[in-house]
Amino acid sequence: MEYFVYQFQAFFLVLVRMTAMMVIAPFFSSGAIPLLMRGALSFFVSLVIFPVLSISNAALTGNMGVYYLMVIQEIIIGIYIGFLVSVVFSAFQLSGQYFAVQIGFGINEVIDPLAQISIPLVGQLKNIIGLLVFLAINGHHFMIKAIFHSYELAPAFALKGESIQAFLKFLAHSFSGMFVIALKISLPVIAAVFLVSVSLGILAKAAPQMNIMMLGFPFKIAVAFGMMILISPLIVRVMNVSLERTFQFIVKVIRYWPV
């Protein structure tokens, strides 16, 4: 216990980085997990990994202003690591929004418990599937390991001013990949709904007496959900590959951390 008392300043920085990651990372940031439980998990995980980290008070300073900046730095690093994974889940939600309006589900929105925002029902379905895939490949374990390895490759007290440019570069790469992932997941459904729309347009010209508007929406919904059921193994595969590549990207970000 004396070790943690004398090393409290360094331990607090580890705790801050871990807590910041859990505040924004998928699964850990879920509203279904009480805030007290998340805080306790951050504390005990930090308590376990701190003794094996090469952090000492030698790099600390007695100036509280400088120490305050160190705490802000650790918060930024933790949020940055968690945010890179949350971008992928945004891609899962975006894939459902691509065709939700076309099949008449754009007005039907639900509350996302992870992001605490209103999203279309199809996007929430894709988000839940992505979360199950995330847990199936032990993504929650990887996030804790990423924080641990970040102290080996991106040590505390070492962030420099020129890091902002590299941060923006990695973020731009993540956002561009988000749209690519969303398009990969939703493209088969978008193509099927587009073909149905073209067919209904031709039918409306051939038989004007038919109420195509009333027939079109249920038919589009049936085709869209039938296509989603048909390609569900492909969707899970794309989500699995996307999360694994995101984990590899995070490792690359940490390895080439600009310090």
Image (tube, grey):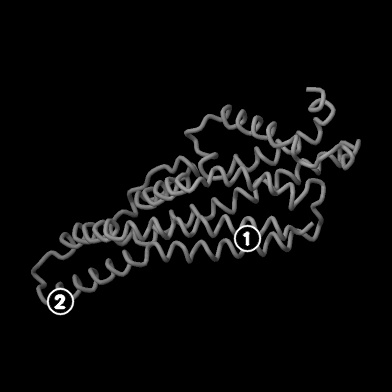
Which sits earlier in the primary sequence, circle 1 or circle 2? 1
Where is residue 152? Give x, y as percent. Answer: 74, 49
* Residue tagged 2: 205
SS for tag 1? helix
* Residue tagged 1: 171
- Which sits in the foreground, 231 or 136? 136
Residue at point 44% right, 56% down? Answer: 239
Where is residue 211? Give x, y as percent. Answer: 13, 64
Residue at point 89% right, 40% down? Answer: 58
SS for tag 2? helix
Horizontal side of residue 122 vs 7, given as left or right: left
Horizontal side of residue 213 vs 71, given as left or right: left
Q: CA distance from mark 1 to mark 2?
A: 48 Å
- Which sits in the foreground, 168 or 49? 49
Nearer the viewer's eye, disc 1 or disc 2? 1
The three-letter code of the residue at mark 2 reads Lys
The image quadrant where one finds the N terminus is top right
Residue at point 82% right, 46% down? Answer: 157
**Disc 2 residue crowd, few under 14, some 14–19, many 20+, Cα 10 Å:** few
- Residue 204 lies in quadrant: bottom left
The three-letter code of the residue at mark 1 reads Leu
